[in-house]
Image: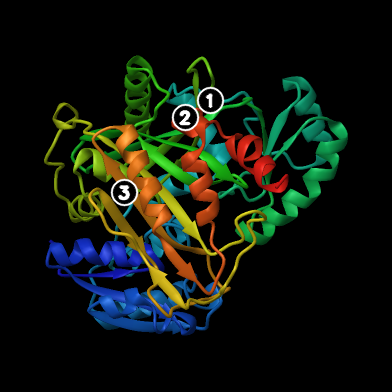
Amino acid sequence: MFKKVLIANRGEIAARIIRTCKKMNIATVAVYSEADEQATYVKEADESFLIGKPRVNESYLNIDNILHAAKESGAEAIHPGYGLLSENAGFAKRCREAGFTFIGPSEDVMATMGDKVAARQAMKEAGVPIVPGTDQAVTDVEEAKAYANEFGYPVMLKAAAGGGGIGMQAVNGDDELEKAFEGNSKRAESFFGNGTMFLEKQILNPRHIEIQVLADGHGNAVHLFERECSIQRRHQKVVEEAPSPFLSESTRKDMGETAIQAVQALHYKNAGTIEFLVDREENFYFLEMNTRLQVEHPVTEEITGIDLVEQQLRVAYGEELAFRQDDLKRNGHAIEVRIYAEDPVRFFPSPGQLTKFEVPKGEGIRHELAVAGNSMVTPFYDPMIAKLIAYGEDRDQAIFRMKEALENYQVEGIKTNIPMLRDVIAHDKFKQGATETSFVEKYYLPAVTNN
């Protein structure tokens, strides 16, 4: 096994990776920006290296500085976490060329699945159902309008290199599309260096359900069941759970087998997630593949007992998966909420000095933390400061434990979305499992804006 791993990330995911590395007796190397010098993960690592100024392009996206730190530390492998450089094929290639093991899939697979148009084509060839849409990039608004009228409105305008809802917008007619196209293309160019767009037919009132997969370099691939990720704000997930309260066992089986079919067609290796949109009749369509660890991976760990970071490390080292599909069983129910430093109504970031930060304890409660008491939440990075996970023998127990934990979560000095999370978890529609992607717009926002 690796003796030393550098973590090319920050915050709670860096701390999460460090925890598993310590369990496996692997030394860890943290990298940090000037803004993160006092961050908790930096203190938890065995070694740490300053890699630049606060802005991400000067630090966490600075490949030269990260590779220099890896070389200086004597690390053998680099774990990218999620976000930042985790799905950057160029970074994976640079790691390999510099002699480091990249803990993730090959750069070729990352490049294919990172381009949403190429990913659609690959999945179509693999026999995976895809949403009707363009099979090539759309370069101008007139071409976009022609396709939209062919498919029929409403359609989703999406950035080919996008993620996190950036550059994505639902449009209902030619006028809306004309207004949206240029702005979303420019936004995508700014965030991803690629303003290419494509169109998909909009699936009305869908659920966002994803399948966790693992594959090794010896031809073995498994899925670790599904996660329900439908509660989102601005196309970004805020509440996830496993298993989905919606799927029938037959659809669950079909989705798992389809995900493995996709993995095998790609010759994929390491952890990944196949994301689907699922309509009310349980028809499912490929949305995208995340070629990395997901933010919401803890709920899968809770219901399977599998440490996904450990499996990533073992696969990257060349080991064979120690289990097969028939060995994997679901046990209980888990719910995760993402705690953001943000206004709970407008969802604007709320950086500042934490004056109080106390997390609840209790049976079935797990925390993944990016901050501690008296931490400074900077404006430079994603505003997620923690994840709270509640496990129960069934969904009702998991909901009860989550509700109790949120009531006892104490944060002062900044605004957080905890009031929103409390309202969502307590809502009758959530308790009923009615968690379509329109949940926040349909049930939460009208309630808070009318009060």
Name the residue at 49% across, 48% down. 422
* Residue drawn at x 43%, y 80% as measured from the top left: 374
Work out how far the residue at label 3 is from the one at label 2, CA to CA, in angstroms. 27 Å
On screen, residue 51 versus residue 360, left or right, reads: right
Whether residue 105 can be seen here: no
Q: Give the secondary structure at mark 2.
A: helix
Which residue position is annotated with label 1?
130
C-alpha span from label 3 to label 1: 27 Å
Hey, what amino acid is under mark 3?
A: Pro
The answer to the question of whether label 1 and label 2 lie on touching residues, with beta carbons closer than 8 A, is yes
Rounded to the nearest whole Å, what is the CA distance between mark 1 and mark 2?
A: 7 Å
Query: x%, y% of residue 285?
Result: 51, 25
Which residue is under mark 2?
123
Q: The residue under label 2 is which amino acid type?
A: Met
Frontmost of labels 3 and 1 is 3
Label 3, on which residue? 298
